[in-house]
Image (cartoon, grey):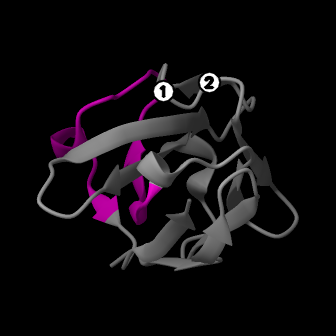
């Protein structure tokens, strides 16, 4: 059973930055797509960004494009979500997810493995 361990959430003022990390327990993630999603209180789980582990290609939701950056460190077997210029509307529980493949999967149902989630709160 593959596990994804997340860290890095917290409280930050608007305009600030946070970096989330996601470390898979399986070191054979070169054939996977890693996604980031977020879920605000009473809302659906929305797509944020994703990265194809093999090659590093990235894709972003329009709402975060230019502010968030997804990357991976092969040596540390870790995926990151760098979040800059945070806004109060970015407040949510953030989840990393994984599935085998090499395309872009914007629907949460397409992912097989999920992290436990980490809370990000942006104050105004």
Residue drawn at 47 percent across, 25 percent down: 61
Using the image, determine if residue 69 lies above or below residue 63. Answer: below
- For label 2, the crowd category at 10 Å Cα-Cα, with few meaning under 14, some 14 to 19 and many 20 or more, is few
Q: Are marks 2 and 1 in contact (CB under 8 Å)?
A: yes
Residue 5 in the magenta stretch? The answer is no
Residue 37 picture location, percent across and down: 38, 49
User: Residue 98: horizontal and vertical position, in percent?
Assistant: 42, 53
Horizontal side, residue 47 vs residue 70: left or right: left
What label sits on residue 110 in the rendered view?
A: none
Instruction: Name the residue beneath numbered marker 1.
Output: 63
Q: How many marks?
A: 2
- Label 1 SS: loop
Percent across and percent down for residue 6 are: 54, 76
- Can I make out residue 78 in this image? no
Question: In the image, is residue 101 above or below residue 116?
Answer: above
Q: Is residue 93 magenta?
A: yes
Q: Is residue 24 visible?
A: yes
Which residue is labeled 2 in the image? Answer: 65
Residue 18 picture location, percent across and down: 72, 64
Q: What residue is drawn where x is 26% and y is 55%?
A: 112
Instruction: Point out the stretch of residues depicted in magenta.
Output: 91-113
Instruction: Examine the rendered structure and indicate whether residue 117 appears above or below residue 60.
Output: below
Tell me the SS state at disc 2. loop
Q: Which residue is depicted at the point 57% across and 47% down?
A: 87
């Amino acid at each position: 059973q593959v596990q994804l361990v997340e860290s890095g959430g917290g409280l930050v003022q608007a305009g600030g930055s946070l970096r989330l990390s996601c470390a898979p327990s399986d070191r054979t993630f070169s054939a996977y797509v890693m996604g980031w999603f977020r879920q605000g209180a009473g809302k659906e789980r929305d797509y944020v960004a994703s990265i194809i582990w093999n090659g590093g290609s990235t894709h972003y939701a329009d709402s975060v494009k230019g502010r968030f950056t997804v990357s991976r460190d092969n040596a540390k077997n870790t995926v990151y979500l760098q979040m800059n210029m945070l806004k109060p509307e970015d407040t949510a529980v953030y989840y990393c997810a994984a599935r085998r493949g090499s395309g872009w999967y914007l629907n949460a149902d397409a992912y097989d493995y999920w992290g436990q989630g980490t809370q990000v709160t942006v104050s105004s």
